[in-house]
Image: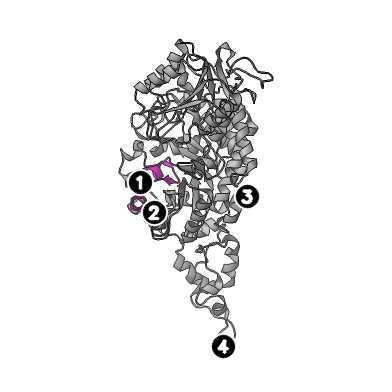
């Protein structure tokens, strides 16, 4: 029998010490507002009053006690909290809206919005993004203090805590103000092929996340990137071989969970074989179940078998499982319950991908989308565009009998148990004064640099151009292509090059650069001893493209045709070679992270061994495992 919170208090006044003993082990203390059964001295008419004997009676007499059913003994803090929540509060627990990790002064609109979500809507958690480590920790402590039930906090940390909490850059310096540890992309880990490095990356990610108050790093990506035209996964994947993705992904998540986090494999059932960005529209994965089992699902099954704590859904249309209905997999009972829960045996937390993405938000009313996700089997509604509408939709669905309260309770209890496992019943805050000793520390940076150094992959080296000598008098030009907002792209790389080539000329290009600017660059290239072209083409949500402008590829082709010595370094999309197939030297840095820029520069000059192997095909030129080995340079040559 279920008891309301008030009923439990009434029973407590009648049963006294016996009842308290039965549940004392199940309710932990919290910092901030307390949840669960109140302590005896906080209840009017409590233990001392209930146990006092009547003055004239020889034996204690209890009236009508036979009609009072004894309360249940709760097995855990999670069970006790669930028993006190109203329907609205239960629905709120499933919501995880997005918040910035920025400084939000009391009374600001940003701070007021967050407070309303936590105090008024009663959300069960937040996903935090972008901020400096200390500000994030302080902000999350404040939110935890204001929440009735401890919050489960998540963040998108595919490349370590520095992926979102890399501090800030003060312009026009630029002065790097420091931050958490940022790793190269997961495909860089794939290029190393090293399980231990994958596990170490996961461990560092988990340690820094927990130090900031984050419990759920949304990583690793378990998608198999088997489509070179994929505009949204690309280097976020470990590679193209399902076995390698499964092996490295499992090592990564074990590292996260050994450090105390809840690793989350994404994007189920596999977002690798598509040419569509689900931020923009609904992608279609049109393969049969046999192919799904052997490719897309294999890394997820390995992670489930290994005990991964969370799975994030993908917004896809999968005809093999949903038939002619174009329902997104996030809203499909066949996919989340039939496939993930029943067939694959997953019993952890199911997170939806962001519900504000167009693949969902364009096709469904916001209340309806939340209800359908719950019906499908999701536990957490991530980033609902309107949290209040999502909560109200869930409440109405239960009140009208469309969704049973037991179904809602199952997800709420799973979340509460995760919070209990994270220790939030006892202590929901972090020690801000310890952030500097746990986040972005040299030991963690060394791990990131080792991943970067060992990942550098050389696929073409005509005329044995590499390694370079670094003659200080050489006429060298560095041409950097970057996104218009990627202000740090090439900064570290060009600084390392300039330390060898003091006279080096630098040119920066972006998608808005006028076509005639390339003519001037080509003229200058004709008088140079060497041209280094660095391409920072990375995944950006809602862009729908990981290509370079036609003018950029034509410029590189012209360098080749005129036999101007040149090196092309890709700090992102590895598949770009198809756009300039005659490039003399092609080096893969795998990401624009500072450690990757530093590693690529060292590799050019032979300061480190080039030993990476591509974990994906580069059609039509290279196969999985290709890569030119170049040892550390022992003596120079007569070349810049």
Mark 2 or 4, nearer chain start: 4
Residue 20: x %, y % from top left: 57, 68
Spatial separation of the CA atoms under disc 2 and disc 1: 16 Å
Mark 2 or 1, nearer chain start: 2
Find out whether the residues at labels 4 and 3 contact each other: C-beta distance under 8 Å.
Answer: no
Find out whether the residues at labels 2 and 3 contact each other: C-beta distance under 8 Å.
Answer: no
Asked whether 150 or 135 is in front, the reply is: 135
- 397 inside magenta stretch: yes
Badge 2 element? helix
Badge 1 element? loop
- 52 inside magenta stretch: no
Mark 2 or 3, nearer chain start: 2
Q: Nearer the viewer, mark 1 or mark 3?
A: 3
Number of residues whose C-alpha sits closer than 10 Å to that of mark 4, classed few (under 14), some (14–19) or many (20 or more): few
Mark 4 or 1, nearer chain start: 4
Spatial separation of the CA atoms under disc 4 and disc 3: 63 Å
Residue pointed to by mark 2? 110
Number of residues whose C-alpha sits closer than 10 Å to that of mark 2, classed few (under 14), some (14–19) or many (20 or more): some
Spatial separation of the CA atoms under disc 4 and disc 1: 63 Å
Asked whether 97 or 74 is in front, the reply is: 97
Q: Nearer the viewer, mark 2 or mark 4?
A: 2
Residue 72: x %, y % from top left: 53, 62
Q: Which mark is residue 385?
A: 1
Q: Is residue 135 above or below residue 329?
A: below
Spatial separation of the CA atoms under disc 2 and disc 3: 29 Å
Residue pointed to by mark 4? 55
Spatial separation of the CA atoms under disc 1 and disc 3: 36 Å
The magenta region covers: 370-399
Asked whether 155 or 551 is in front, the reply is: 551
């Amino acid at each position: 029998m279920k008891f309301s919170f008030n009923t439990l208090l009434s029973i407590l006044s009648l049963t006294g010490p016996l009842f308290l003993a039965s549940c004392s082990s199940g309710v932990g203390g919290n910092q901030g507002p307390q949840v669960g059964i109140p302590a005896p001295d906080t209840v009017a008419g409590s233990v001392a009053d209930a146990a006092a004997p009547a003055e004239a009676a020889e034996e204690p007499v209890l009236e009508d006690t036979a009609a009072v059913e004894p309360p249940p003994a709760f097995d855990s803090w999670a069970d006790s909290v669930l028993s006190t929540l109203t329907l609205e509060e239960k629905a709120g627990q499933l919501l995880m809206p997005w918040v910035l990790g920025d400084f939000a002064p009391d009374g600001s609109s940003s701070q007021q919005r967050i407070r309303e979500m936590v105090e008024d809507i009663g959300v069960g958690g937040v996903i935090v993004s972008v901020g400096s480590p200390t500000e994030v920790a302080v902000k999350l402590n404040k939110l935890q203090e204001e929440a009735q039930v401890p919050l489960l906090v998540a963040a998108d940390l595919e490349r370590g805590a520095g992926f979102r909490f890399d501090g800030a850059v003060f312009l026009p310096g630029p002065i790097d103000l420091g931050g958490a540890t940022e790793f190269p992309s997961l495909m860089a880990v794939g290029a190393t092929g090293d399980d231990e490095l994958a596990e170490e990356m996961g461990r560092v990610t988990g340690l820094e996340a927990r130090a900031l108050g984050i419990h759920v790093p949304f990583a690793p990506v378990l998608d198999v990137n088997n489509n070179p035209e994929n505009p949204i996964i690309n280097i976020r994947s470990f590679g193209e071989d399902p076995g390698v993705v499964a092996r490295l992904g499992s090592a990564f998540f074990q590292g996260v969970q050994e450090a105390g986090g809840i690793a989350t494999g994404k994007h189920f059932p596999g977002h690798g074989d598509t040419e569509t960005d689900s931020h923009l529209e609904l992608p279609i994965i049109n393969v049969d179940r046999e192919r799904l089992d052997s490719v897309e699902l294999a890394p997820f099954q390995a992670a489930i078998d290994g005990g991964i704590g969370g799975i994030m859904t993908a917004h896809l249309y999968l005809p093999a499982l949903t038939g002619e209905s174009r329902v997104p997999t996030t809203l499909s009972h066949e996919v989340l319950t039939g496939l993930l829960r029943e067939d694959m045996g997953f019993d952890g937390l199911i997170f939806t991908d962001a519900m504000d993405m167009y693949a969902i938000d364009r096709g469904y009313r916001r209340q309806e989308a939340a209800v359908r996700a719950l019906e499908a089997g999701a536990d957490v509604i991530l980033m609902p565009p309107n949290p209040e509408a999502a909560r109200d939709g869930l409440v109405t669905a239960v009140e009208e009998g469309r969704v049973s309260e037991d179904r809602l309770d199952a997800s709420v209890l799973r979340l509460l148990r995760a919070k209990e496992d994270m220790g939030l019943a006892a202590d929901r805050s972090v020690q801000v004064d310890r952030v500097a000793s746990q986040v972005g520390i040299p030991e963690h940076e060394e791990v990131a640099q080792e991943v970067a150094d060992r990942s550098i992959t050389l696929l073409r080296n005509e005329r044995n151009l590499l390694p370079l000598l670094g003659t200080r008098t050489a006429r060298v030009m560095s041409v950097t292509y970057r996104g218009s907002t990627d202000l740090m792209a090439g900064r570290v790389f060009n600084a390392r090059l300039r330390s060898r080539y003091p006279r080096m000329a630098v040119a920066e290009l972006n998608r808005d650069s006028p076509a005639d600017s390339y003519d001037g660059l080509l003229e200058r290239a004709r008088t140079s001893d060497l041209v280094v072209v660095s391409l920072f083409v990375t995944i950006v949500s809602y862009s729908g493209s990981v290509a370079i402008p036609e003018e950029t590829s034509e410029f590189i082709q012209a360098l080749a045709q005129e036999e101007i010595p040149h090196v092309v370094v890709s700090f992102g999309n590895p598949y770009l070679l198809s756009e300039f197939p005659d490039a003399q030297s092609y080096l893969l840095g795998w990401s624009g992270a500072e450690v990757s820029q530093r590693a690529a520069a060292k590799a050019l000059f032979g300061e480190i061994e080039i030993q990476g192997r591509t974990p994906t095909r580069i059609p039509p030129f290279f196969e999985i495992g290709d890569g030119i080995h170049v040892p550390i340079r022992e003596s120079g040559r007569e070349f810049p």
